[in-house]
Amino acid sequence: MRYVVTILMVLMVAILGCVKAPKTDASAPAIDAENTETADGEFVYEPGTWIENWDNAIETARAQDKTVLVNFTGSDWCGWCIRLVKEVFDHQEFKDYAKENLVLLKLDFPRAVPQSDELKNQNRQLQAQFGIRGYPTILLVSGEGKEIGRTGYQDGGPANYVNHLKSFVK
């Protein structure tokens, strides 16, 4: 009997070992970071879109009198980050609030998604500057680059999250 159980276990391990594992980022929702430039190379922010450049976000927030929502994320590996995107950022209620009130800045620390050295350096520098220790960390920042509030994942969907954000921005 032991011999049969051992053989069955070895066969199961062999069979399962041959199954192709899914990609780590297959279930990760995408926050598309979009940088829009005019024909002369000047940056133009499209309200409600995610950008990746700190200077552009601060400049836009200052010019439009908005708050920057800074999303420190591990987009392709962090479970809570993925959940925040699926449960909040992908919903129209959040998008509508963001278009009117926020400049969205994504500072990503992926494991499998390639990034330029310039982007990696910017993100690391800002991570150190703001003392970020975990993901997701969401900062609300003024047009002067000063932190207004700090949060992360919150249960309750987009309506609850929007109300939570409003508690930081008067």
Image (tube, rainbow, N blue to C red):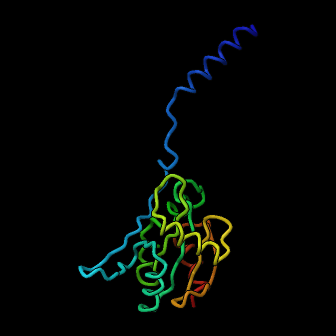
Question: In front: 72, or 28?
Answer: 72
Answer left or right for 47 relative to 27.
left
Q: Would you place residue 33 above or below residue 103 in this image?
A: above
Report the front residue among 159 and 147.
147
Q: Residue at x 41, y 79 (%)?
A: 99
Closest to the observer: 116 or 136? 116
User: Residue at point 53% right, 26% down?
Assistant: 18
Left or right: 99 in relation to 133 = left
Query: In the picture shown, does residue 84 fall above or below 43?
Result: above
Where does the N terminus fall, quadrant-wise?
top right
Q: Position of residue 57 (x, y in %)?
A: 46, 81
In front: 8, or 155? 8
- Residue under the image location 36 percent in, 73 percent down: 35
Picture quadrant where residue 44 is located: bottom left
Determine whether 60 is above or below 83 in the image: below
Residue 22 percent coordinates (x, y): 50, 40
Residue 91, percent from left and from top: 45, 66
Quarter holding the C terminus is: bottom right
157, above or below 22, in the image: below
